[in-house]
């Protein structure tokens, strides 16, 4: 699951990188990339043609998703906020022949990532994130500022952990789950796939998949939207 040190570089000595989806998360990811200094940002791609040819925070919107296949030497990060949208883009790019080796992992230099932790391709860790020991993140996981993941936590692909989320030890976060800002999860608890914890939720017991839980202690609110069917 760990990503090896990148090999391809451009004339600046930094590997070229394209951010997919000109979103708020993409802008935050761009700042993390600039701070880390490892990649040369080429710009954004986006499905909205009205954005093509414009600039966002000094970076160009290069065109649609086909730009990724036209620039095979560039790495890619998927930047929609919702995990379902990241999953849809990953499927589209896979159908276009984009392999996992193309996906960069972006880690802000102020993040603290234990050497015993593993990051899947396409992960984004923003400023102040802490992974203490033996934390495992799947593909295209997004961890927002100041989230803390402690020993033996496992976060499955496409999950999103918002700012200041805290996971106690041995927590399991299922595929595509969304943990709102400030959510707390007790040791050993499992958050089911494609479930949502509301902002500030204090989660003391397992949350089934495809449900929305809120409050302190967290309780069931309603069913969550279903994830797209697997191809």
Image (tube, helix red, strand yellow):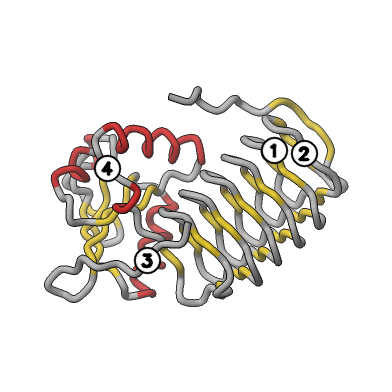
Q: Is residue 146 above or below residue 214?
A: below
Q: Do the numbered discs 3 and 1 sit on residues whose CB atoms are within 8 Å? A: no
Q: Which residue is mark 4?
A: 98
Q: CA distance from mark 3 to mark 1?
A: 30 Å
Question: Do tag 1 and tag 2 residues touch (Cβ < 8 Å)?
Answer: yes
Q: Secondary structure at mark 3?
A: loop
Question: Mark 1 to mark 2: distance in Å?
Answer: 6 Å
- For the residues labelled 2 and 3, the Cα–Cα distance comes to 34 Å
> Left of 143 or right of it: where is 9?
left
Q: Residue 88's quadrant in the figure? A: top left
**Pointer 1: what residue?**
192
Between disc 3 and disc 1, the foreground one is: 3
Image quarter of residue 198 = top right
Q: Nearer the viewer, mark 2 or mark 3?
A: 3
Mark 4 residue crowding within 10 angstroms, few (<14) / some (14–19) / many (20+): some
Question: With 183 as the anchor, is 16 left or right in this view?
Answer: left
Q: Position of residue 227 (x, y in %)?
A: 55, 28
Find residue 4 and name its label: 3
Q: Which mark is residue 207?
A: 2
> Quadrant where the C terminus lies?
top left
Q: Is residue 106 above or below residue 71?
A: below
Q: Which mark is first along the chain, 4 or 1? A: 4
Distance from the alpha carbon under mark 2 to that under mark 4: 34 Å
Tell which circle, 1 or 2, labels the residue nearer the N-terminal end: 1
| Res 168 quadrant in image | bottom right
Which residue: 55% across, 74% down? 115
Ranked by sequence position, the earlier of labels 3 and 4 is 3
Q: Earlier in the sequence, mark 2 or mark 4?
A: 4
Mark 1 closeness class: few <14, some 14–19, many ≥20 residues within 10 Å: many
User: What element does badge 1 sit on?
Assistant: loop
């Amino acid at each position: 699951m760990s990503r090896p040190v990148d090999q391809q570089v451009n004339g600046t000595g930094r590997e070229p990188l394209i951010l997919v989806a000109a979103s708020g998360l993409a802008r935050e990811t761009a700042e993390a990339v600039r701070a880390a200094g490892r990649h040369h940002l080429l710009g954004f791609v986006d499905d909205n043609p009205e954005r093509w040819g414009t600039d966002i925070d000094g970076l160009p919107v290069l065109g649609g998703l086909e730009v990724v296949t036209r620039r095979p030497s560039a790495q890619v990060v998927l930047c929609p906020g919702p995990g379902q949208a990241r999953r849809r883009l990953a499927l589209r790019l896979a159908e276009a022949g984009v392999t996992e080796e193309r996906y960069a992992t972006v880690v802000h230099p102020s993040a603290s990532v234990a050497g015993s932790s593993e990051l899947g391709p396409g992960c984004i860790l923003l400023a102040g994130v802490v992974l203490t020991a033996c934390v495992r993140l799947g593909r295209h996981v997004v961890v927002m500022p100041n989230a803390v993941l402690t020993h033996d936590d496992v976060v499955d692909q496409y999950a999103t952990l918002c700012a200041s989320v805290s996971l106690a030890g041995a927590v399991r976060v299922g595929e595509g789950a969304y943990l709102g800002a400030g959510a707390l999860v007790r040791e050993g608890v499992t958050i089911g796939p494609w479930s949502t914890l509301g902002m500030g939720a204090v989660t003391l017991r397992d949350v089934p998949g495809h449900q929305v839980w809120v409050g302190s202690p967290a309780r069931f609110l309603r069913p969550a939207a279903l994830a797209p069917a697997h191809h």
